[in-house]
Amino acid sequence: MKNKNEKGFALILSLTLLLVMSLLGGSLIVITSGDHQSNNTSDEYQQAFYVAEAALLEAEKDIISSMMGEWLDPNRPEGVDMRDSLEGTEENIAAHNAYVTQLQAFQVTSADGRNLARDIDARKIPQNVPAAQSGLDRDTQCFRSFKNLVNRDTIEVVRHRTDQNFHDLIIFPLLEPGNYAAVDPLATDREMERERERMSEYFFEYFSVNLGSVAFKGSGSSLKKTTTNVQRQGTQYKIYGCGYLERNGDIEILIPLETIVTLES
C-alpha cells in the first residue's frame, strides 16, 4: 500500500522543480534586461550632458571669435569687402589693399587646408540685438526649459544657434573612416560606423546674453617685475546651452546648462 501511494511522487516533484527553475530563470532574464535598459538610458543621459557642455564651449568660442575678428579668406577677391562706410576713393582703395596684404601676411592654414586670417578691423564686443538679428527663437524646448529667464518675452540675446548636430559639427573630423584606427585600434569599422550613427542623434543649442561691463581681478605684471592681481575691465556674458537626444523628430532627453563668463574688453 505504501509503494502504491508513492507512485508518481518523483514525477510531481520534478515538474514542481522545473516550474520553480523556469520562474527563477524568467525573473533573471527580466532583471538583466531591465539593468541593460537602465544602463543604456544612463549612458544616453550622460552623453546628452557632454553635448550640453559642448554647447557652452561653442557659445564661448562664438563670442571670442567676434571679439578677435571673424575668420575669412584674404586670398579671394570677395573674401575681404571694403567697409560700407568707406567711399571708393583712391586713398580708401589703397588702404583697403594694404589691409588685405596685412591679412595675407598673418594667414594660417586650417585643418581642412584653407588659408584664413582674422578680420581684425571687424573686431567688436558682441551686444544683445533684436530677435531678427540674433536668430532668437523663444519656442524651442531648450529656450523654454530655462525657467529662471527674466523677461523671457522681451529678452534680447547676442546670438541663438539651434539644431546644431553634434556629429556633423564636432565629432565628424575625428570619426572619418581614415581615422578609425587612430581613434580606437580595437574597434571594427562596423562598430565605428554604429558609433557615428549614434552620435548623429545628438544635437545642441545655445544662446548668450550680454550682462554688461564688469570689473574683475586678473593677473598682471607690475613695474617692479612682480606678478600681482590687478583690476581689469571686462564684459560679462551669461551662456545658456542644451544637449539633447532626438529620434524621429522627437526630443527624448534634454539637458539644460548655464554658465557665466567674463571676457576682458
Image (cartoon, rainbow, N blue to C red):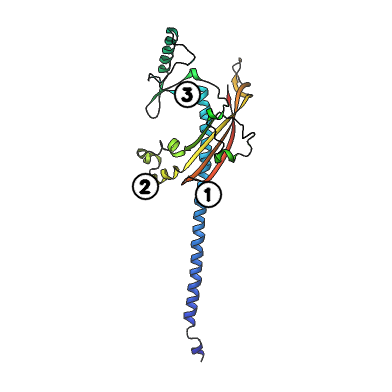
Amino acid beneath label 3: Glu
Determine which quarter of the picture holds residue 199. top left
Above/below status of 34 relative to 110:
below
Which residue is more in the foreground, 58 or 208?
Answer: 208
Identify which residue is drawn at 50% across, 22% down: 68
Q: Check disc 2: other Cα within 10 Å, few if <14, some if 14-19, many if 20+.
A: few
Under circle 2, the secondary element is: helix
Q: Which residue is mark 3?
A: 70
Q: Position of residue 255 (x, y in %)?
A: 55, 42
Identify which residue is drawn at 38% across, 45% down: 193
Under circle 3, the secondary element is: loop
Q: Which residue is mark 2?
A: 190
Amino acid beneath label 1: Ser
Q: Check disc 1: other Cα within 10 Å, few if <14, some if 14-19, many if 20+.
A: few
Q: CA distance from mark 2 to mark 1?
A: 24 Å
Viewer-side label of 3, 1: 3
Image quarter in which the C terminus is found: top right
Q: Earlier in the sequence, mark 3 or mark 1?
A: 1
Above/below status of 167 relative to 219:
below
Q: CA distance from mark 3 to mark 2?
A: 38 Å
Asked whether disc 3 touches disc 2, contact meaning CB atoms under 8 Å apart, the reply is no
Q: Earlier in the sequence, mark 3 or mark 2?
A: 3
Residue placed farthest to the bottom in the image? 1
Viewer-side label of 3, 2: 3
Q: Position of residue 32 (x, y in %)?
A: 50, 59
Q: Earlier in the sequence, mark 2 or mark 1?
A: 1
Q: Which mark is residue 42?
A: 1
Asked whether disc 2 touches disc 1, contact meaning CB atoms under 8 Å apart, the reply is no
Q: CA distance from mark 3 to mark 1?
A: 39 Å
Under circle 1, the secondary element is: helix
Amino acid beneath label 2: Arg
Q: Position of residue 83 (x, y in %)?
A: 47, 16
